[in-house]
């Protein structure tokens, strides 16, 4: 393929097979990500429509539904009881981590397709239960790793597969944000151990580097080392205000850092024997690709393609899978591996040694 053809196809939906049809979505959890990103993404999608909103109170669900021209707003209890189940085909679960399982189980029992936000749950054990529930009900489950449908990441994976970097040698990842400036309240779920699970910085931010590296390399980490630390009072009860960890991808080494209490930044770099691929920024609703080889480098700029656009691609991808009865990926088993990695990262700090993943 020529460079011109490659550029022309940069944002091609290489996964799309459906040509028509509509998947009606119920959104479970109405935090800012669902209302400000997911709903606009579905509205801009080719195959999706939001028809039901689910929240903790009927007042909020009905109010947000009316504000966004959505036909129904119901409570969590009504959702689990099957209320309005005939009005949607698929469910997007966007609650705090520790509540994902109950709503995924309910959706599976209602014979719905399911997109569950990452990380898929608060612990490996609960994630395993989620996978089992969906297998038992034969319900398609996708974990919402939106980077896997971002064109820049997909083109980067193609280049690595084609040998552009030679043999991959190392990966560096970083993801940070000033959480307390973004949400100036210490009483929030990302700072509540019972809701977030294994800490906060690795679960919420570091998981981007982990999963995107897995996708780019098409391999999984087998062992980890880590150093976690907490200093700020707002992170009391959480051991990873700051996190640094090294992953062994069975021959490719990755070093990554993450924190909820620093300057907003994200990057991911894959270095090989012949070249390098870099994404910076990488994860915060903007992903830019830079490639380098033989003393030359090229930066790929594109028109605005932010978090809404990434989510639009994700929702359309999932709808395409449902409409064509095709396998879903990344599925629950894929998401389970990330939680096994995160669990091992926390254990490695406790033991001070190397921990095998999923042992």
Image (tube, rainbow, N blue to C red):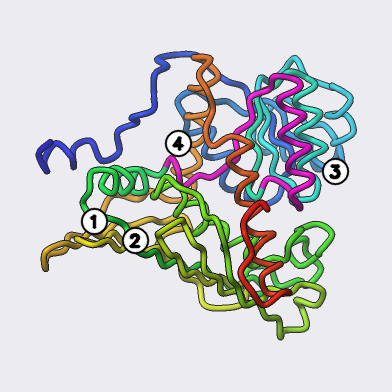
Q: CA distance from mark 3 to mark 1?
A: 49 Å
Q: Which residues are magenta?
A: 120-149
First-in-chain label (2 vs 3): 3
Q: How many marks?
A: 4
Q: Nearer the viewer, residue 57 or 66?
A: 57
Work out whether 170 lies above or below 156: below
Q: Are marks 2 and 3 in contact (CB under 8 Å)?
A: no
In this figure, which residue is indicated by the disc labeled 4? 313
Question: Percent position (x, y) of residue 68?
Answer: 64, 36
Q: Nearer the viewer, residue 85 or 268?
A: 268
Q: Nearer the viewer, residue 84 or 133?
A: 133
First-in-chain label (3 vs 4): 3
Q: Are marks 3 and 1 in contact (CB under 8 Å)?
A: no
At 75% across and 25% down in the image, what residue appears? 108
First-in-chain label (3 vs 1): 3
In this figure, which residue is indicated by the disc labeled 3? 56
Q: CA distance from mark 1 to mark 4?
A: 27 Å
Mark 1 residue element: loop
């Amino acid at each position: 393929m020529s460079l011109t053809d490659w550029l022309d196809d940069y944002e091609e939906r290489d996964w799309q097979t459906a040509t028509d049809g509509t998947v009606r979505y119920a959104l479970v959890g109405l935090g800012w990500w669902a209302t400000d990103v997911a709903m606009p993404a579905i509205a801009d999608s080719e195959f999706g429509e939001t028809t039901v909103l689910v929240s903790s109170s009927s007042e909020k669900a009905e109010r947000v539904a009316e504000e966004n021209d959505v036909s129904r707003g119901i409570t969590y209890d009504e959702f689990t009881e099957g209320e309005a189940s005939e009005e949607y085909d698929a469910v997007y679960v966007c609650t705090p981590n520790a509540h994902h399982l109950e709503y995924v189980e309910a959706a599976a029992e209602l014979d719905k397709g399911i997109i569950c936000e990452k990380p898929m749950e608060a612990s490996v054990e609960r994630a395993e239960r989620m996978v089992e529930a969906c297998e038992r009900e034969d319900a398609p489950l996708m974990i919402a790793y939106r980077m896997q449908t971002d064109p820049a990441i997909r083109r980067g994976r193609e280049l690595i597969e084609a040998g552009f970097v030679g043999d991959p040698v190392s990966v560096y990842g970083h993801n940070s944000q000033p959480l307390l400036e973004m949400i100036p309240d210490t009483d929030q779920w990302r700072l509540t151990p019972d809701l977030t699970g294994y800490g906060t910085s690795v679960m919420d931010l570091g998981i981007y580097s982990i999963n995107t590296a897995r996708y780019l390399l098409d391999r999984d980490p087998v062992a980890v080392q880590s150093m976690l630390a907490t200093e700020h009072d707002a992170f009391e009860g959480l051991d990873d205000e700051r996190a640094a960890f090294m992953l062994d991808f069975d021959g490719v080494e990755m070093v990554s850092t993450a924190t909820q209490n620093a300057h907003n930044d994200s990057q991911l770099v894959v270095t090989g024997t012949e070249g390098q691929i870099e994404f910076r920024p990488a994860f915060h609703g903007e992903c830019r690709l830079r490639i380098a080889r033989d003393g030359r480098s090229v930066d790929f700029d594109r028109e605005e393609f932010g978090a809404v656009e990434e989510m639009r691609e994700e929702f359309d991808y999932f709808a395409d899978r449902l409409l064509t009865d095709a396998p879903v990926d990344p599925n629950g088993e894929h998401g389970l591996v990330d939680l096994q990695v995160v669990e091992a990262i926390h254990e490695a700090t406790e033991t001070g040694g190397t921990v095998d993943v999923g042992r």
